Image: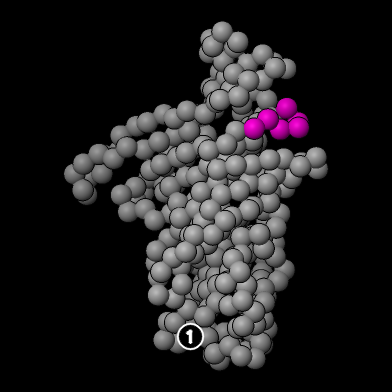
Amino acid sequence: MQYDPVHQEWVYFTIFEKNVFIEEHGFEVEMILPVFVRRDSVMSLISYNEFGPYAFNHCIGALEPSHSNSWIAAGNTTCFSEEHPTNCYQESGRVIKRLPDGTPEWSLIDTAFYNPELGSSSYLSGLTEAPSGSIYAVGWAKDFDENNVYRSYGWLLKISKDGCIDTVCTTLSISQQIQDRSYKVKTYPNPTSDYIFFELMDGIVNPAVLELYDLTGKLLIRQIVQTGTQSVSLEGAAHGVLFWQILNKSGLHLAHGKIVVDK
């Protein structure tokens, strides 16, 4: 909870809950919707604004005023779809920005690392805003190795004032940078809109398999790639973050990373 001395209001986040009946399982699950609340100095309700969608879990860990008299908040969301609420492996960091009256300005979801089989686990618990309007959110994220053993890493995410990921490399662990450098896989441009170049230099298995996933873990592209540079079309890919990985023909993980689609 924060006090707004300009408007003499209290602002905070809470949640709405609803039960969703899953016919195929024969029971109900609880879904959560975050709500931004404004109250006057004596705590009488002024307004509340929902921001969805409903999810298996939501948490806001930090709330701060913005230089533009807006509000910024950071936390996490788990399983942002009602399609499979009991089979969710998607825990994502979330940063949101509200206008002074509480209405949505933008909301950003990012996972830092994503394993197509094991999903993701990440959380943002603090944030601040630079004079330029860029927002820095901090937390932690888990990354899995080729044996599906995870380690937790500190996570620093830079976001533009318009709600776009500003620096992709802030989510790379040291081990990932060493691994990617060892296999000499380059991607560009990043961010991109309609296509992405993958440059596989000498030292990587040839041929290899490229897989591209969206935030829900849906496989978008799977194709054979060779040493050299190849263009991959992103036609039909939604705005946001996509994850890629390079495998050998036996399915052994060689390298991975993320790209931002900004259309």
Callout 1 amino acid = Asn
Label 1 CA crowd tier, 10 Å (few <14, some 14–19, many 20+): some
Image location (x, y in percent) of residue 3: 63, 20
> Seen from this angle, which residue lies furthest right?
132
Q: Viewed as shown, does residue 98 lie left or right of 123?
A: right
Residue 23 painted magenta:
no
> Seen from this angle, which residue lies furthest top?
42
Residue 68 painted magenta:
yes
Let me know if residue 115 appears in the view. Answer: no
User: What's drawn in magenta, residue-wise?
Assistant: 64-69
Residue at (67%, 77%) from the top-left corner? 186
Task: Provide the residue designation for mark 1.
Answer: 248
Q: Where is residue 63, by image quadrant?
A: top right
- Disc 1 element: loop
Q: Where is residue 244, by image quadrant?
A: bottom right
Image location (x, y in percent) of residue 178: 61, 76
> How many numbered circles does the render carry?
1
